Image (cartoon, rainbow, N blue to C red):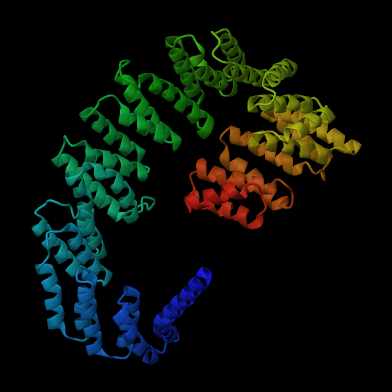
Amino acid sequence: MTKFILHIVFIFSLTFLFGQSTDEQLANYYFNEGDCEKALPYFEKVYDINPSEFIFKRYISCLKESNQEKETIQLIEKQIANHPYNLEYQVALGDEYEQQSNQKKADKAFLDLIDNLAPNPRTIIDLQKAFSNLGKYDLALQTLEKGNQVLKGNYPLNIQFAEVYGALNQDEKMIKEYIDLLDYNPGMISSLKILIPRMIDFDEEDNARFKMFQNELIRKIQKNPDDAIYSELLVWALIQKRNFPAALVQSKALDKRTTNDGREVYKIGNQAALNNEFSTARSAFKYIIELGEGKPYYYSAEQLLLNTRYMEITTLRNYSSSQVDETINEYQKTLARMPKNGKALPIIRELAYIQAYYGNQPDSAILTLENALNLPKYNDVEEAKIKLLMADVLVLRNNVWDASLLYMQVEKQFKYEPIGQEAKFKNARIFYYDGDFIFAQSQLDVLKEATTRLIANDAMNLSILITDNLGLDSNFVAMGQFAKADLLLEQHKYDEAFQLYDSITDIFPDHKLKDDILMRKSSAHQFKGEWETAIGLLLEIVEKHGDDILADDALYQIAQMYENHLFDNKKAAEYYFQLMRDYPGSLFVTEARKAYRKIN
């Protein structure tokens, strides 16, 4: 019985609701069909029951379309009566008078709103936005000016002023308002760092707004030399502009006026180094070191100065033998001052690497690493890194089997960890160099499942190279020569390696190793910083061996060189795009797409 009664109540409720919404359904149906004549009587009924914004907007739209000017005014007045605190409707009334060519009434409606503004920030901002939404920016500006008067400086309207000035194309005033916001509350700097990139394109080379912004900040700094907030914002802006030298000048001045401990300069140095602005990074770290050992960033700056030298040589590869010697000397001086413990190992590895691969001092590098192994033990991983580098240098010296023993030690100790897998891969290459391709490939097949993608990819590429080029006797001979040339390349014996590579193409002119030889030669020229020559060899792969597996890799390397070494983003974008277009299934496409979006 109870269920029956509830069922009846439910049916009556549905019937009531359906009957109540029928007029609204019909009004909306005819509106959507574009038939305002039929929709109007239903909207009139519905509005009396439900004067919502949705119904109001549709109702007034139909009245305007039907040229019912008097009724339009009456409807807005009703809406104002229903929502007396919503200034948007009061502005809409003045706008309707204006549309009906009754400018006198429109002006009175607008000015009454402005003249009678209450000292309430929310009300002032709502009225400004209502004017702005209708494109009435002069009235929006008058609203804010009146608002400043009634608020008597107790609430900042700088952001609203800036928005209106921006809409009026008064850029200098807009920028001044944004910066003046810091006078009221320095804590707003975080908000400004979000707002400013919306009005300034920092990537645009000659941006007028940036110049205005920079000039206004400099004016503020000169006027308020003890207020660090403006200098902080200027340093931030210069970093966005990637003008690291100018940012460093400002950060030094800021540091001297504030903490004088090198904190801000340290940040600039790090950011400059990350962006390959090594000269600026060096200047930053030297400044901190000159502050003295008692400062908190001294030892970090000392190590980073060395690392910047290291990155400059190994990344840009634009150096002279005297610069390498100077860098080695700086490393040795720093290590002489440092405690003889495991914390020095990262610096020792960098020194040994430069000695071996750039200073032509492999014997000195071995001695440096042997001494490192005699230091108090820091941890097993750091010790393994020293052994791994020592093995690499032994390969450079042609002591390949001594190197193999060290690789095996590291592999055994860290069998399931990335450093152990790296050692296993490098040891597999020893057997590849020696012509034991079957054993090398058995090791490489295991590494295809390595946890690090780089090792897995390297293992797969070498495995594919062996598989594709073993079979016939002639192929075996060619592959043996190729492996020997690879070892010479690893040992930086470039002329001998190139002669051996060329002998393969002379003896086997149709051999499939042609594109691999071009890739190897390009890698050698890249190591020496001979970017144009390296690019030419890679372009030959793309043009003559476009259907082979190295073509997409070649395009990616070309783009990377243009972006990171020749600093030609236009050319880099061209080759990233060619890679994405011609080789959509390439493993390099994801990285190419990211790089293309960043620079294009």
Name the residue located 36 percent from the left edge and 87 percent from the top edge.
42
| Quarter of the image where one finds residue 583 | bottom right
Q: Is residue 567 left or right of residue 255?
A: right
Closer-to-camera residue (59/578)? 59
Q: Is residue 338 left or right of residue 445?
A: left
| Quarter of the image where one finds residue 425 | top right
State the count of labels. 0
Q: Is residue 61 left or right of residue 506?
A: left
Closer-to-camera residue (277/450)? 450
Find residue 214 and report its horizontal and vertical position in percent: 25, 47
Closer-to-camera residue (357/217)? 217
Regarding residue 41, the answer to whether it shows in the image is yes
Q: Note whether 169 is above or below 595 in the view shown.
A: below
Regarding residue 496, the answer to whether it shows in the image is no
Q: Is residue 539 left or right of residue 338?
A: right
Name the residue located 20 percent from the left edge and 45 percent from the top edge.
182
Find residue 269 and report its horizontal and vertical position in percent: 38, 31
Name the residue located 22 percent from the left edge and 45 percent from the top edge.
217
Find residue 290 and report its horizontal and vertical position in percent: 31, 20
Q: Note whether 583 is above or below 278 in the view shown.
A: below
Can you name the residue that lies furthest to the front here? 1
Find residue 10 and report its horizontal and vertical position in percent: 47, 73
Name the residue located 21 percent from the left edge and 86 percent from the top edge.
100
